[in-house]
Amino acid sequence: MPLEELLSTSTIWLAKGGVALLVLTLIAFIARWGIRFRLVGVSSFTLLLSVSCWAFGLSYTPTIKVDGAQWAPIVFDNGDDLIVAQAEADFPEQAIEPTLQQLAGNVRPGGRISPEVTVRLRQLQPAGEGGSRPVILGETVRDFRAG
């Protein structure tokens, strides 16, 4: 089941359960049952879970997949305007552009000050004596003003 559908279904069932528990809590207070205060906690927590699932469902955006893109882990993100991903040593050249598009498409603007984020794909190449040097394979800019 996709996450969006699971969140929607969970929200509905938790809301129905919370309302049912709330009604049961009201009956418990009228009948002076000993369990009434526990029912307050259970019903309020169930309603809180329902609201939380609903809010997460509104804010959730699935990741973007681009055909031809390869997995490249992000090794640096300054939280503002620069993200660097690491390409493996045998990274194919035809996968550079789709990978950059996928990485840039999955960048979210939340918490970033700059409206533009530069996404770089780098590869570490041997530089002798056990050292290595970073080589930039490609770069793209994600502009949040453009959408």
Image (cartoon, rainbow, N blue to C red):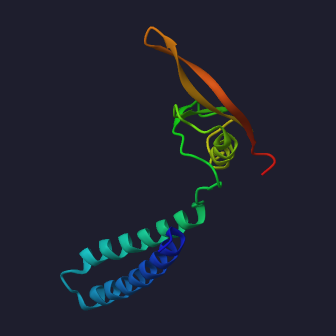
Q: Is residue 97 visible?
A: yes
Q: Is residue 114 visible?
A: no
Residue 137: x and y, percent?
66, 30
Please report the residue visible at 67 percent of the width from the left and 46 percent of the height from the top.
Answer: 98
Pick the front one: 83 or 121 = 121
Please report the residue visible at 65 percent of the width from the left and 26 percent of the height from the top.
Answer: 136
Left/right of residue 29 with respect to residue 8 in the rendered view: left
Please report the residue visible at 53 percent of the width from the left and 35 percent of the height from the top.
Answer: 90
Q: How many marks?
A: 0
Looking at this rendering, what residue extends furthest in the top direction? 129
Look at the picture and state if 75 lies above or below 48. above
Please report the residue visible at 34 percent of the width from the left and 86 percent of the height from the top.
Answer: 26
Looking at this rendering, what residue extends furthest in the left direction? 34
Residue 141: x and y, percent?
74, 37
Look at the picture and state if 108 lies above or below 92. below
Residue 96: x and y, percent?
66, 39
Residue 87: x and y, percent?
55, 34
Pick the front one: 146 or 31 = 146
Pick the front one: 109 or 32 = 109
Q: Quadrant of residue 115?
A: top right
Left/right of residue 17 with respect to residue 131 in the rendered view: left
Left/right of residue 63 with respect to residue 21 in the rendered view: right
